[in-house]
Image: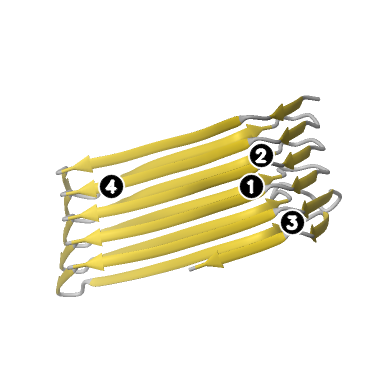
Amino acid sequence: RDEAQLGGTSSATATALASNDRIGVNLLGADFSGSQLTATADSAIARSGDGGDVVVTTGTQVLGSTATARSAGTTVNITGGISATLGARAIGRSTGLAGGTGADLLVLGGALSGTSTASTRTDADTVGIIGAATARNALVADAAIAAIDGGSGNDQLETSGNVTLIATSTIRSDRMTFSGVGANSATGSSEILARASGIDTGAGDLAIHSNSAVNSGQLGLTAVAAASDASTAISLVGASVATASTAIRATALGLVGNAGRDTLLNSGNLSVTAS
C-alpha cells in the first residue's frame, strides 16, 4: 500500500508526433498492404499500482497531452486484386489521478488545469485504383481527459478543489484525390472523439465492486470535436464504388458510474459543455 501527498506545484505533459511527407507506394498483383500513422500521448499527475493506494493533492497541478498525426503528399497507386489499408490516428489521454486494481483513496484538492488534444491531418494525398482492388483509408482523432479515474476495485474518489479540463479532437483533410477504374472499391472514414470527465469510477470495475465519487469543489469540463474537408476530388470509371463516412462525438460528464455499485454525489459546482 503506497501513500503520497502532492503539495506545491506539479505538472505532467506528454507530446507525440507521427508524420510522413511525399511518400510514394505502388502495389501490383494479389497482395495485401497496410500503412497507418499512429501518435499516442498519455500523461498523469499520479498513477497508482496494484495495491490499495492513497494519493492526496493539495497544491497546483498542470496536466497536458498533445498527439498529432499528419500525412502530406502521400501517393498510393494500386493495380490488381490488392487490399490496402491506410490511415492516421492521433490519441491523447490525460488523467489527474489514476487508480489501479486495488481499493484506492484518491483525493484531488487544490487546483487542477488540464488539456488533452488529438489532431489528425492529411494534405494533398492521392489514391489511384485500377482493377479489382480494395482501398480503405481510416482517420481517427481521439482525446480524453479526466480529473480522477478509479481504475478497478472498491475506490473512494473525491474532488474538492478547482478543476478545469478541456478535451479537443480535430480532423482536417485537404486536397484529397481518389480515382478508380474498373471493378474496385474505396472506403474512407473519419472518427472524431472528445471526452472530458470529472470523476470516473473506472471502466475495469465488476458488478461486485463498490465505489464512491464525490465532488465538493469546482468542476469545469469541456469537450470539443470538429472535422473539416477541403477540395476533395473523386473520379470513378466503370464499376467503381467509393463511400465516405464521418462520426463526430463530444462528451462531457461530471460523475461517471460503471459496472459496480456506485455512489455519486455532487455538493459543489459542476459545469459541463460538449460541442
Give x and y (percent) for residue 264.
Answer: 80, 58
The correct choice, above or below, for 151 with respect to 168 in the image is: above
The residue that label 1 is drawn on is 147
Earlier-in-chain disc, 1 versus 3: 1
The residue that label 2 is drawn on is 97
Give the side of residue 45 with respect to residue 51, left or right: left
Residue drawn at (67%, 55%) of the image:
218
Earlier-in-chain disc, 3 versus 2: 2
Earlier-in-chain disc, 2 versus 1: 2
Q: CA gap, disc 3 to disc 2?
A: 17 Å
The residue that label 3 is drawn on is 258
Q: CA gap, disc 1 to disc 4?
A: 29 Å
Q: Element at badge 2? A: strand
Q: Element at badge 4? A: strand
Query: What is the tally of numbered marks visible in this picture?
Result: 4
Residue 31 appears anywhere in the view: no
Give the side of residue 87 with respect to residue 124, left or right: right
| Mark 2: amino acid | Leu
10 Å crowding of disc 3: few (<14), some (14-19), many (20+): some
